[in-house]
């Protein structure tokens, strides 16, 4: 028996929001760099290009993930989201290399900054746009369990904190005249976004490897099943996997052998409905087996023994 819930609405409009925010911040940060000549602000602008590339990839993958299952993809396209987050993670790492290279060159050949006040004001406006967009994407991503939107939101928030560091650094250079502070802060920016990129790549790889649902969700399922065990049922072969915004749960339900098919079906349906209470977008599949039959106990592993 199988049950699922209504598909979540298309999330592509939030990818368009991210694209618009990326274009706006590229223009603003580019102006800030042009006005000041700060390599720190240049590094900030380069990361916004990564934001744009990531947002375009997110739009593509969210569009693909929203497609219904077909004959060649019977479980749907939800795993496409992991390609987006992995792609964005790799872009972040490439941006870090570019920023680091530019910062080292500027550290070797210091350059004074100009029009710092206006440049910093423009950069602050860009950061406010990123912050507001990140908050929206994070909320929607968590609500709909979309790793693509969450990855985009985390990246934008990293950009916000990065911008804060760069703005502080440029301000210190302006106040102290220590030109070496600008490229040093740019190097710290590069190190910070390397960490973000690695985390995104790691999480994407876990999803592509069919990672299970979080431990707290598994514990909720086990607590639910314990209540049914007290009523004479038993369970085994519980398996879960996360696939983008979708969750898949497979479970063998052992019921008394003298029950009718209708009785067993009714109890299995009840269990599936209760699992949906804490995994609302799960696709739950249950398999009925008789408690008394020894054969019911030999298929607990993923690969059933052959005789």
Image (tube, rainbow, N blue to C red):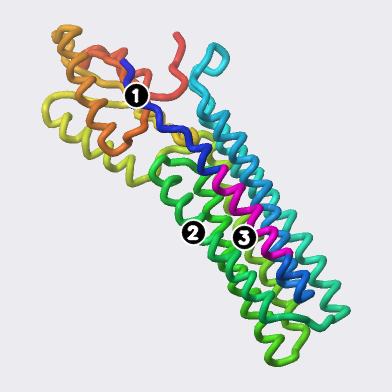
Earlier along the polypeptide chain: callout 2 or callout 1? 1
- The quadrant of the picture occupied by the N terminus is top left
Q: CA distance from mark 3 to mark 1?
A: 36 Å
Tag 3–tag 2 contact (CB < 8 Å): no
Left or right relative to 239: residue 21? right
Numbered disc 3: secondary structure? helix
Residue in the picture at 60% in, 49% down: 20
Please give the label number shown on residue 4. Answer: 1
Residue sitting farthest toward the right: 109
Identify whether 109 is placed above or below 12: below
Residue nearer the viewer, 3 or 171: 171
Nearest-to-viewer mark from 3 and 2: 2
Residue in the picture at 66% in, 53% down: 23
- The quadrant of the picture occupied by the C terminus is top left
Q: Residues within 10 Å of mark 2 (few under 14, many from 20)?
A: some
Residue in the picture at 75% in, 67% down: 42
Please give the label number shown on residue 195. Answer: 3
Residue 88: x, y in percent? 64, 47
Residue sitting farthest toward the bottom: 176
């Amino acid at each position: 028996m199988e049950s699922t819930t209504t598909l979540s609405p298309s999330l592509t409009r939030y990818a368009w929001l991210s694209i618009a925010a990326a274009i706006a911040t590229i223009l603003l940060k580019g102006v800030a760099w042009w006005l000041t000549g700060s390599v720190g602000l240049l590094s900030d602008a380069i990361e916004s290009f990564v934001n744009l590339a990531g947002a375009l990839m997110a739009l593509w993958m969210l569009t693909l993930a929203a497609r219904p299952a077909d004959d060649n993809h019977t479980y749907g396209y939800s795993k496409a989201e992991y390609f987006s987050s992995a792609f964005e993670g790799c872009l972040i790492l490439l941006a870090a290399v570019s920023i680091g290279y530019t910062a080292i060159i500027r550290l070797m050949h210091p350059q004074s900054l100009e029009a710092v006040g206006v440049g910093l004001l423009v950069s602050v406006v860009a950061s406010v746009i990123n912050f507001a967009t990140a908050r929206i994407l994070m909320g929607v991503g968590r609500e709909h369990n979309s790793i693509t939107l969450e990855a985009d939101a985390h990246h934008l928030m990293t950009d916000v904190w990065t911008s804060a560091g760069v703005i502080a650094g440029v301000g210190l250079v302006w106040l102290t005249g220590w030109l070496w502070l600008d490229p040093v802060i740019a190097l710290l920016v590069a190190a910070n976004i390397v960490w973000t990129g690695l985390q995104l790549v790691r999480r994407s790889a876990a999803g592509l490897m069919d990672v299970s649902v979080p431990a707290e969700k598994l514990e909720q399922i086990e607590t639910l099943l314990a209540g049914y065990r007290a009523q004479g049922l038993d369970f085994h072969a519980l398996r879960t996997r996360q696939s983008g915004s979708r969750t898949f749960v497979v479970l063998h339900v052992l019921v008394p052998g003298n029950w009718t098919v209708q009785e067993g079906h009714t109890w299995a349906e009840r269990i599936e409905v209760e699992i949906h209470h804490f995994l609302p977008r799960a696709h739950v599949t249950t398999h009925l087996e008789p408690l008394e039959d020894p054969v019911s106990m030999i298929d607990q592993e993923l690969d059933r023994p052959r005789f």
